[in-house]
């Protein structure tokens, strides 16, 4: 397949055919650079060489009644993690300060649980107002299931984005969670969009899904049009139901990132959890299809330090976008020259 031609058609508004998508997933190792070259052409058209850095804070850990099999904080997990209730404003502000010092474009506040209480919404809202006043930083929250009223309160407080991942296909979802449904997640995203929040919604690859599940969730995210798509790769934490699942391997992770870029050319695509574990020494190559990364760890697992991430970005000739110049998703850049 001519991946440069595919890139041109994607930029023109077409989506990959099923045959093309399967060919990307099954591409031999000798064609991987061609797959990535086409994906980079699409990425460059909309985002140039910019890379956004995001930083998470686990503002409430464990204590979750849900049975998500991938999660170390779930009710069915026996992982040895720290458990605590919602942290105070001082710690939330300290996290924002660290994120700003790391050159983060966005500060992501995450709490465990099925969904936030009224008191938690009020607590987070007042903290967000202070963070925005002190740092002017874009704020994303991931709080579980939400209705329109609570989404509206978050918007009023100054929250910019709502994260709620689809995680996998609708067909496969009951295999990884039984305490809520795929439709519950879709409804939460609709509540966020209805309240005027930007959407951050992505996937976790490597949970045992098949090829059809991969294609289905790529298609679903294309229809959803989230501003941001975090692509996570399962980090099989000991003590979770998926702890023994085989790793995807760096080459397949790169193919999956490229596939997501071909399906979602205008969305910010972030390499999320599992980057360090699954991509290993090939992490830098993820910047060719993706234009965003997390630094300084995830919810219960460590990650690449901010200074190392800056060096990786700069070594490849990419640029850190602190000001959010690439947020507009406007494809007005000239096309790169790719041999």
Image: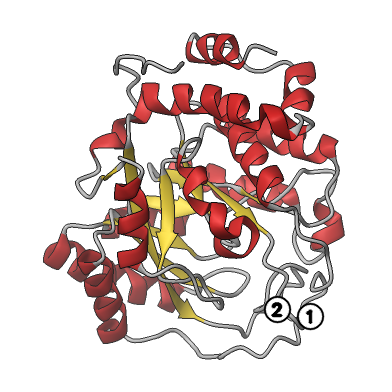
Question: Around disc 1, counting alpha carbons within 10 Å, would you say few (fewer than 14), some (14 to 19), or many (20 or more)?
Answer: some
Name the residue that disc number 2 marks. Answer: 65
Q: Position of residue 154 (x, y in %)?
A: 36, 59
> Circle 2 — which element?
loop
Is 138 situated left or right of 247 in this image? left
Examine the rendered structure and indicate whether residue 29 appears above or below residue 104: above
Q: Position of residue 291 (x, y in %)?
A: 41, 41
Q: Position of residue 126 (x, y in %)?
A: 26, 72
Q: Residue at x 52, y 25 (%)?
A: 37
Q: Residue at x 75, y 61 (%)?
A: 180
Q: Quadrant of residue 223?
A: top right
Is 26 situated left or right of 320 in this image? right
Examine the rendered structure and indicate whether residue 124 appears above or below residue 273: below
> Circle 1 — which element?
loop
Question: Around disc 2, counting alpha carbons within 10 Å, would you say few (fewer than 14), some (14 to 19), or many (20 or more)?
Answer: some
Judged from this view, the residue extending furthest toward the left is 134
Q: Nearer the viewer, mark 2 or mark 1?
A: 1
Please count the marks in the image. Answer: 2
Cα distance in 3D space between marks 2 and 1: 9 Å
Task: State the residue in front, 105 or 27.
Answer: 27
Examine the rendered structure and indicate whether residue 278 appears above or below residue 66: above
Q: Quadrant of residue 129?
A: bottom left
Name the N-terminal-most of marks 2 and 1: 2
Q: Residue at x 73, y 15 (%)?
A: 17
Task: State the residue in front, 268 or 302.
Answer: 302
Residue 263 appears in the picture as rendered: no
Q: Which mark is residue 76?
A: 1
Q: Position of residue 93 (x, y in %)?
A: 24, 77
How was the colour assigned to the protein in this rendering? secondary structure
Q: Residue at x 77, y 83 (%)?
A: 239
Residue 286 appears in the picture as rendered: yes
């Amino acid at each position: 397949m001519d991946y440069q031609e595919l890139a041109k058609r994607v930029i023109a508004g077409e989506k990959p055919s099923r045959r093309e998508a399967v060919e990307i997933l099954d591409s031999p190792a000798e064609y991987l650079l061609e797959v990535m070259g086409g994906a980079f052409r699409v990425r460059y058209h909309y985002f140039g060489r910019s890379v956004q850095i995001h930083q998470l804070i686990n503002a409430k850990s464990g204590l979750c009644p849900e049975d998500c099999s991938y999660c170390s904080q779930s009710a069915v997990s026996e992982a040895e993690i720290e458990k605590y209730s919602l942290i105070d404003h001082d710690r939330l502000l300290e996290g924002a300060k660290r994120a700003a010092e790391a050159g983060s474009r966005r500060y992501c506040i995450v709490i465990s649980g099925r969904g936030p209480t009224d008191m938690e919404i009020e607590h987070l809202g007042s903290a967000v107002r202070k963070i925005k006043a002190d740092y002017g930083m874009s704020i994303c929250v991931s709080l579980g299931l939400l209705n329109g009223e609570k989404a509206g309160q978050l918007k009023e407080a100054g929250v910019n984005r709502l994260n709620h991942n689809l995680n996998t296909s609708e067909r496969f979802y009951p295999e990884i969670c039984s305490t809520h449904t795929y439709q519950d997640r879709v409804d939460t995203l609709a509540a966020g969009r209805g309240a005027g929040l930007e959407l951050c919604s992505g996937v976790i690859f490597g949970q045992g899904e098949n090829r059809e599940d991969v294609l289905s969730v790529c298609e679903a995210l294309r229809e959803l049009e989230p501003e941001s798509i975090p692509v996570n790769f399962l980090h099989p934490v000991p003590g979770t139901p998926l702890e023994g699942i085989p790793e995807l391997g760096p080459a397949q992770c790169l193919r999956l990132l490229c596939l997501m870029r071909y399906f979602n050319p205008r969305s910010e695509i972030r390499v999320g959890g599992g980057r360090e574990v699954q991509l290993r020494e090939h992490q830098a190559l993820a910047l060719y299809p993706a234009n965003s990364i997390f630094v300084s760890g995830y919810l219960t697992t460590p990650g690449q330090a901010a200074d190392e991430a800056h060096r990786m970005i700069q070594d490849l000739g990419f640029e850190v976008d602190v000001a959010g110049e690439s947020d507009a998703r406007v494809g007005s850049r000239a096309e790169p020259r790719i041999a």
